[in-house]
Amino acid sequence: METLYLILIDPFVQMVDEPSFLVEVLIGGLTSGVMYSLVALGFVLIFKASGIFNFAQGIFVLFAALNFVGLMDLGVHPILAFVITIGIMTALAFAVDRLVLRPLVNQDPIILFMATIGIAFFLEGFGETLWGGDVRPVQVGIPDAALFWELGFGEILVQSADLFAGVIAAFLVTVLALFFHFTPVGRALRAVADDHQAALSVGIPLNNIWVIVWAVAGFVALAAGIMWGAKLGVQFALSTIALKALPVLILGGFTSIPGAIVGGLIVGAGEKLFENFWGVPLLGGATEDWFAYIVAMIFLFFRPQGLFGEKIIERV
Amino acid sequence: MTRPGDILLSVKDISLRFGGVRALTDVSFDIHEGEIFAIIGPNGAGKSSMLNCINGFYHPQEGTITFKGEERRQMRPHEAAAQGISRTFQNIALFKGMTTLENVMTGRMLKMKASFVEQAFYMLRGRQEEIAHREKVEEVIDFLEIQAIRKTPVGRLPYGLQKRVELARALAAEPQLLLLDEPMAGMNVEEKEDMCRFVLSTNHELGTTIALIEHDMGVVMDLSDRVVVLDYGKKLAEGTPGEVRGNQDVIDAYLGVSHD
């Protein structure tokens, strides 16, 4: 009984007792969640447009951040460094298209997936060769101060950097969603994602579209890299954090942009809540590392296509 | 019924091999402007391969294809589309996640003049364009009588309607040459009649030249101005439906011939 009470009742009693703590935890969770969304978006973009699960997306985040920070350390202005890095990511998209995707066109998805693992290892090594393996702090002038907000039920503490990151990520996510749904290019991207042959026959040049998608994914990776970098410093562990996008995708559905967004928020908020109200008192903490994966596994049992994914119905 | 127009597309001595398999051998024919041209033949005769060569999915090893007086060898599908060739597929290739309207809009892709960047970010010119194209698309939708399903995701539509949406998408591109790969396959009688009506009115009212593959002989005889018959990748006969129907080789190919 005692254990059941601790698991089922006590956490909620605490939430009600200390609403300001609950709100703090939620805000913390949602702001990191929105950054998971950002990384997950990179995966979804490429998966939608080419049916490839790009294992290297996590490294893209790291590689983009490395270039950005490296350039800034050389004394380049942040805005210029940002632009140059976008250029680098676009060039990378071109290279991936020419050197990896085109020679492998019409191969099984698993072959392409293996190729992206290759890209991941290459970029990890290449990034380290170029910029070294040290942890580098990112200073792009994101204000970092502790803000105290007076709410009806008490005072809460919010990190302004977290808020800033959240707003930027939310903005990017919205722009991308609108871009996909309301512009002809977005329509072309979705068309390619849906059926390559049909897309070709209405005159969509497949190769250009792939370059665009990979470049956009690179841009998203850069944004995610800067945000994470500002929080944790640019280090090689970033690529592992980026893999948190996997459970996010399983939750939201691999083909859905809104899914990536909502999935990220659920995972972010869920793991912080679980950590603070269940993990620390009952399990001694450190649940954040695995909570998302357990949720993803449960989802795979009951809703394998994710919250927003297209349900696969085969007619027999 | 033959309306002699200028030659729109000329196929000359086309040979296509996949490894050791000869899909097409020395096939030649001309498609004239304004006609409905049928490609028929038993299963595996190379009909779809022929269409795929015309619209650039396959590149024949030998022979030439001349479209609008311009010879070309290695052409990619999107270039063929840009020149005014659009098509439908045997196994329906629609964008299943999109609505009917969005599917038909993709047919206008090549007519959009504003650059990618303009479309995406600088909305002014992109917006005006979108509206103009939308009007054209609505015309096509009216023409094929699919107003009622404009907002329905095509994955949910019945087979016959999906075929019609596919035709709408091809028509939205305002093609000069329309390739139809088995437009009536798997349809019931009413759906076939509807489709025949649309094919005919496309030809008569819009003046579109049509090349189609079809197995239903009744349909072929009714619709087409001229017919080419393929068998084992070779041309067996060419002519009006009446001429082809009387051809002994064609009868043999379809009914089989005793080798004694």
Image (cartoon, coloured by chain):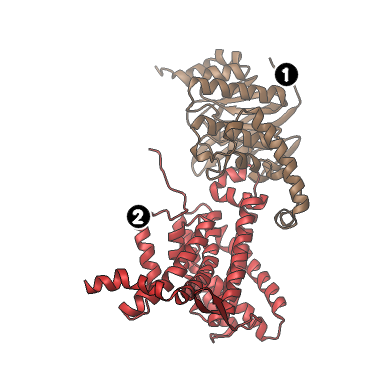
Chain colours: A red, B brown
- x and y, in percent, of residue B128 in the image: 77, 46
Name the kind of residue labelled 2 in the image. Phe
The residue tagged with tag 2: helix, strand or loop?
helix
* Relative depth, front residue between A5 and A292: A5
* Residue at mark 1: B3
Q: Taking A39 as reference, is B78 left or right?
A: right
The residue tagged with tag 1: helix, strand or loop?
loop
The image quadrant of residue B101 is top right
> Which chain does the residue under circle 2 lie in?
A
- x and y, in percent, of residue B194 in the image: 57, 22
Would you place residue B204 above or below residue A35 in this image?
above
- Whether callout 1 and callout 2 share a subunit is answered no
At horizontal 70% and vertical 22% (from top left) the residue drawn is: B204
User: For mark 1, does the 10 Å Cα neighbourhood hold few (<14), some (14 to 19), or many (20 or more) residues?
Assistant: few
The mark found on residue B85 in the picture is: none
Name the kind of residue labelled 1 in the image. Arg
At horizontal 70% and vertical 28% (from top left) the residue drawn is: B208
User: For mark 2, does the 10 Å Cα neighbourhood hold few (<14), some (14 to 19), or many (20 or more) residues?
Assistant: few
* Quadrant (top left, top right, bottom left, bottom right) of the C terminus of chain A: top left
The image quadrant of residue A176 is bottom right
Say whether residue A169 is visible: yes
* Residue at mark 2: A302
